[in-house]
Amino acid sequence: MVVGEIIISGFNPLNTVSLTFERFIHLLQEGWVLKTLAFAIMVGSVMALIERSGGVGGLVHELSIRRSWVQSKRSALIPSFIAGIIIFIESSITSLVAGAIGKPFCDRYGISRAKLAFVCDSTSAPMCSLLPINGWGALLLGLIGGQITAGLISGQEGRWLLEAVVFNFYAYIALIVTFAVIWFGIDIGPMRRTLPNPPTEEIVDGSPSSVFLFIWPVVWMIAGVIGFMLITGGGNLLEGSGSTSIFYALLLTLVLTWIYYRSMGVMTSREFFTTVFAGAKSLTPIAMILLFAFAIGGVSSDMKVGHYLASFIGDYLPSAYIAGAIFVFAAVIAFATGTSWGTFSIMLPIAVPLAVGLDAPVALCMGAVISGGVFGDHCSPISDTTIISSMASGCEVGEHVRTQLPYALISALIALLLFIIAGVALS
């Protein structure tokens, strides 16, 4: 970030300091930034409450003892994978729920937290991009609508989005690879050297806590996001504000959890608020990392990194290979900036006119943009999804990035080949 600010300021030290200060001031004046930071902190409170109440232990007992659903190393990560598939309202919520579910099983069966973080991250962004009944869909519809308004393409935004999702190859491959890694226990690269937490045998004897101490806060969190997305979108889920919805959903979750835990006699009010503050304190460093990630994204945008990289595509490649090139450049931009949404905003207005001008399949090129953005959101060390997946799994961010990158690159390579094959077939 500092290097970028130095370049923007013309290598003037005083201007560099001034620009950096102004950038953080500007970020802290943005409502969505403040809500996102508050959300990151409040998530720590909710997770701490669920753990302190015994809800996590109750879930372990329900799945592994009463229902016998988790009885082996192979099945230990399946609940997290399923959670990542069925919770597609918001990628951060997906990662958080999947991580909370998976941690006790990973510890019990000797699976590293890095592998859990991989599962959380590899399902959250891909599923949100495949089922865009969320903020992802709202952004993409708006960007596609801009291309229709400009007269570059015709038709309905929804139809174009559905066609583009069909060609979101990276998301499909990432989900398939993740399931294969879980089912066959595939450890490659740095993942082979990760160490699990000492195996535990939790909730085998005695009277376990109720599983509903875990379920209800998660239900309130997810239902709250959906409800506030509808409210902020005027009844249209796709037009709702993601940051606002998550912020108020977590506030509502904390209030309802306090009422529920008090009524169940699980915690006193003093214990509740002590846990809330302890959980918030534990995730304050994560909020700071997110703030710096947003600042880095702003620097990359000001330097027009995306436009610079994309400017090479049209001059050197035939139309059959444009979709593959768009995927590569979108992936590079997303990895460098840590934002899939920023990548969509940069690349879609470039990819559509490029595809139209070179007579390449427009929907395929849109799918390449989405896939590239998902790859970066999945893998970038400054992506909020990467950071939150690490946080939810109890894994260091650096370790998570190193261990999941080989799998992601395999998925990306397969996706690239599919984009090239589809480009040749449809051109």
Image: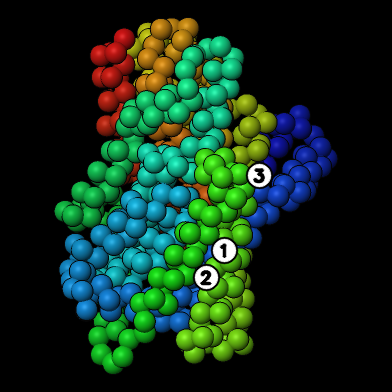
Residue with the mark numbered 1: 250
Residue at the far bottom in the pictured view? 206
Residue with the mark numbered 2: 46
- Local packing at callout 3 (Cα closer than 10 Å; few below 14, some 14-19, many 20+) is many
What is the secondary structure assignment of the residue under circle 2? Answer: helix
Image height of 202 relative to 158, above or below = below
**Label 2 or label 1, whichever comes before in sequence order:** 2
The quarter in which the N terminus is drawn is top right
- Nearest to viewer (mark 2 / mark 1): 1
Question: Percent from the top left, x then y, of residue 193?
Answer: 29, 59
Q: Are marks 1 and 3 in contact (CB under 8 Å)?
A: no
Colouring: rainbow
Q: Are marks 2 and 3 in contact (CB under 8 Å)?
A: no
Q: Are marks 2 and 1 in contact (CB under 8 Å)?
A: yes
Question: Percent from the top left, x then y, of residue 152?
Answer: 53, 12
In this rendering, position of residue 314 left or right of residue 110: right
Residue flagged by tag 3: what amino acid is it? Ala
Residue flagged by tag 2: what amino acid is it? Val
Q: Which residue does the image show at 54% across and 18% down from the upper left?
A: 148
